[in-house]
Amino acid sequence: MRNILINFRAGLGDFLQITPLLFSLHKQSELNLIFVGNVELKYLVDSYPFFIKSIYINYDENPFGKIISLVKLIYFLRINKVDIVFTPVFCAGTFSNLISILSGAPKRFGFSNKNKTIAYTKIIPINNKESNIIQNLKVLDCLSVLKPSLNTIIYISEDANQRTETYFKRNGIFNAPIYALAPLAKGMKGYPSKCWSINNYRLVIDKILEAVPGYVLILGSFKEVEEFRKGFKFTHEGRILFQPNDFSIIDVAALLKKCRLLLCNDGGLMHLAAAVDVPIVS
C-alpha cells in the first residue's frame, strides 16, 4: 500500500478539475490518498470519499500562523509515511515546493513550463493548449494507471437536495424554469477580462424575464449577493431569487442542478455548474 499526497494550493474550480484524477487514483486498491490544501475548501473536500486523511492550511494567515501550520504539517509527515507527492498544474509555489521536499517522498511529481525545480523528481511540462483536467491526468502515465472519463465530479448529499427543495417550495416555485446568474463572483485577480460588467448582468436579467417565464437565481458569496441585491432595482422584482446566506457549496451545487443554465464570470461557480452538467454561458 502506497500513500500519495495531493499537494494542492488553489481554489474551488481548480479542485473540481482534479476530481477525474482523484476518482481514478481512488479506484486503485494499492493507493491511499492524502490531501494537503487550502482551509477554505474543507467543507467541499470532506464531502468526497477519496482521502484517508486531510490537512488544511490557511494560506492567508500571517507569517507566524503559517509557521505554526508548517510545524503541524512537518509533525504529520513524520508520523505518516508518504511515498508519492503530486502537485497539480498551477498549484506550485514556494510553500507547495517546501511541502514536496519536506514530505521525504522518493517520488515527487509536478509541473514546470520553463525552469526546473528541485522539488520534483519528475517534471511534467505545462501545455497551455490543453485543459487543466487533461494536464493533471498526465500523472497517471507516471503511475501506469488508466485514464478515466474527463467529467468533473461532485457528491451532493440528500440533506443538500432536501434543503434545495424546501427553499424552492418556500418561494412558491415547483416546476418553473430557473436561470442562474453569478454577477459578482470574480475570476483570478489581475484578469479583468474574466469579469463582465455588473450593469450588463442587470440588463440581461430584465431581458431574460421579459422573454421567458420563470425565475432568475442570483448566486455568489453572502457579500456578493447582498451587494447585488441592494445595488439595483429590477422590473421583475418578484421573479428574482437570491442564494440563501447559510447555503454551503454543496447546497449551491444542488441549487444549480435545478437550473436551466448558469450565466457567470470565469470562476469556481462555472466549474461547479459543469460538475452537475448544467449549460454555461461564461
Image: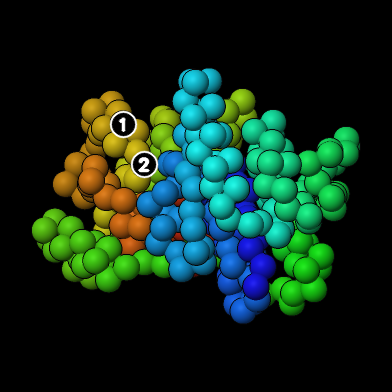
Quadrant of residue 169 within the rendered picture: bottom left
Report the side of 144 relative to 18 (left or right): right
SS at mark 2? loop
SS at mark 1? helix
Q: Residue 120, position in %: x, y? A: 81, 46
Name the residue located 34 percent from the left edge and 33 percent from the top edge: 224
Name the residue located 49 percent from the left edge and 58 percent from the top edge: 53
Q: Residue 167, position in %: x, y? A: 18, 58
The 10 Å Cα crowd at callout 2, few under 14, some 14 to 19, many 20 or more, is many
Which amino acid type is marked by label 1? Answer: Lys
**Contact flag, marks 1 and 2 (Cβ < 8 Å):** yes
Q: In this picture, is 207 found above or below 143?
A: above
Name the residue located 40 percent from the left edge and 61 percent from the top edge: 47
Residue assigned mark 1: 223
Which amino acid type is marked by label 2? Answer: Gly
Q: Residue 71, position in %: x, y? A: 54, 34
Image colouring: rainbow
Q: Residue 194, position in %: x, y? A: 58, 36
Disc marking residue 158: none
Instruction: Confirm whether residue 95 shows in the render.
Output: yes
Residue assigned mark 2: 220
Report the side of 262 relative to 75 (left or right): left
Which one is nearer the viewer's eye here, 134 or 28? Answer: 28
Name the residue located 67 percent from the left edge and 68 percent from the top edge: 2
Real-space Cα separation, disc 1 to disc 2, in angstroms:
8 Å
Q: In this picture, is 265 found above or below 108?
A: above
Quadrant of residue 117 within the rendered picture: top right
Which one is nearer the viewer's eye here, 102 or 261? Answer: 102
Report the side of 15 relative to 58 (left or right): right
Instruction: Confirm whether residue 279 shows in the render.
Output: no
